[in-house]
Image (cartoon, rainbow, N blue to C red):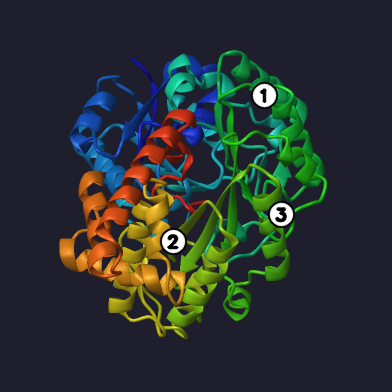
Amino acid sequence: MADIVLATFNARYEHCSFGLRCLMANLGELAPKARMLEFTLDLRPAEAAEAVLALEPRIVGLGVYVWNARESAMLAAELKRLRPELTVVLGGPEVSYEADGQEISRSADHIIAGEGDLAFAELCRRLLSGAAPAAKMLQAPPPDLARVELPYGLYTAQDIAGRVLYAEASRGCPFGCEFCLSSLDRTVRCFDLERLFAQWESLLGRGALRFKFTDRTFNLDSGRASAILGFFLGRYRPGLFLHFETVPDRFPEELFPLIKKFPAGSLQLEVGLQTFNEAAALRINRRQDNAAAELNLRRLLGETEAYIHADLIIGLPGEGLESFAAGFDRLHALRPHEIQVGILKRLRGAPVSRHDGEWAMVYSPHAPYELRQNRLLDFFTMQRLRRFARYWDLVANSGVFALAAEELCRGAGPFGAFLAFSDWLYARTGQTHSISRSRLRNLVAEYLVSELKKSPVETAAMMERDAVNSRRREDGLPPRQALRRDPDEKNAG
């Protein structure tokens, strides 16, 4: 039994909820009365409600994000229908902005907007003592990070054995990119490194190997970034894998010698390029030196063994198909290991909404609020681009069809060549999901032979080499798929 239940839906089992652990770590004297429940998106809300109510809580705190908004709303409604007396508290970026118009808000007794590490604990104290606040919406000020208890001791042996462990060294972002909720607070606050190192040392001693850092701009402070890289280098052992999000055009020189020391397969850098269109970037308050970004990418790819995962966004106000295609080809020429093509989302509270009128931006009203059309990209073009992004992930980013993907991108330009394949694949299947790997392999081979006029014998040999190389790669490296973001997590705040 528990007075307090903290619950959320993760996209997959491999992902731990860092937010729940931060809340639990800061409950203080209430922690023995609390339990954490983590669900995945394939669990029915009735089963989630059963797991919650079986603990007979007085308070339920739900972590709500763009990727679990639907499931969270259904769970909250189930809980209030079944136990009207239960106090439901919501938190997370999805409900921190524009909460009044959301269905889930009707099922909530209180909503904490902002960072809830300390605010949730204080609210629970008041609720359990019978002094509930009158206000439904509670704004939590950014906490003093020196007062925030670190959550790393809450990772269990099971977490360490089979899940990604999230970590953070800082909060906030100094940049103002309007598609991102971090642009609303450009103050960067840092955790004390000695406190962090002591906690991470303990995790490593317990066998932890996979860490994904949530810092928006890991390489912003070269001194702190160097210290963190040095910490893990000094404790390196086979299987260690670190993921960091980096700013591409501000890469301090002193980081390169450290990055060079990491063996292949141990360091993944997510590089947020987003766009090469300078006018579109400026329009959304994004300032990026494209030449410096390209130079840094070339150095990282040519001088280090880091795995480079580069991001581009489709649909920024003022960037049309021709511009995006040129940017994609420009990035492809640098040969990053992955290009993640994302569709622009109008996250709740994000300032990008100020462009809706001028650029006729139309977004889905349902999470993850992806762009449906704008002045330069009509609905049918956006549908083609959405399929392009999905198939690119399945074929090129997966690493399963490395040689075949090279062939698919030959022609006047990689973007146009792969878009032609994408159109053909959708015409043949009518699907973007639930395509088995074996069927996809056959379809790729068919396209190469029938449409690109490749030799059937050479194509079969190439597909076999891809299959062999894929098996060797999967046997020799940790699964990167688990270290990628949850679906729709990008810029979720």
Q: Tell me which amino acid carries mark 3.
A: Arg
Q: Mark 2: give few (<14), some (14-19) or many (20+) Cα within 10 Å.
A: some
Q: Mark 1: give few (<14), some (14-19) or many (20+) Cα within 10 Å.
A: some
Q: Is residue 292 above or below residue 227?
A: below
Looking at marks 3 and 1 on the same chain, the residue that comes earlier in the sequence is marked by 1
The residue tagged 3 is 299
On the picture, is 7 further left or further right than 268? left
On the picture, is 145 further left or further right than 363? right
Q: Nearer the viewer, residue 369 or 336?
A: 336
Mark 2 to mark 3 CA distance (whole Å): 25 Å
Q: Tell me which amino acid carries mark 2.
A: Gly
Q: How many marks?
A: 3
Q: Tell me which amino acid carries mark 1.
A: Tyr
Mark 3 to mark 1 CA distance (whole Å): 23 Å
The residue tagged 2 is 342
On the picture, is 493 further left or further right than 248? left
Residue 114, x across and y down, in percent:
54, 47
Query: What is the secondary structure assignment of the residue under circle 3?
Result: helix
Residue 33, x across and y down, in percent:
44, 17
Query: What is the secondary structure assignment of the residue under circle 2?
Result: strand
The residue tagged 1 is 236
Looking at marks 1 and 2 on the same chain, the residue that comes earlier in the sequence is marked by 1
Query: What is the secondary structure assignment of the residue under circle 1?
Result: loop
Residue at 73% x, 65% y is 292
Residue at 42% x, 33% y is 472
Residue at 20% x, 59% y is 431
Looking at marks 2 and 3 on the same chain, the residue that comes earlier in the sequence is marked by 3
Callouts 1 and 2 close, C-beta under 8 Å:
no
Mark 1 to mark 2 CA distance (whole Å): 33 Å
Q: Nearer the viewer, residue 201 or 418?
A: 418
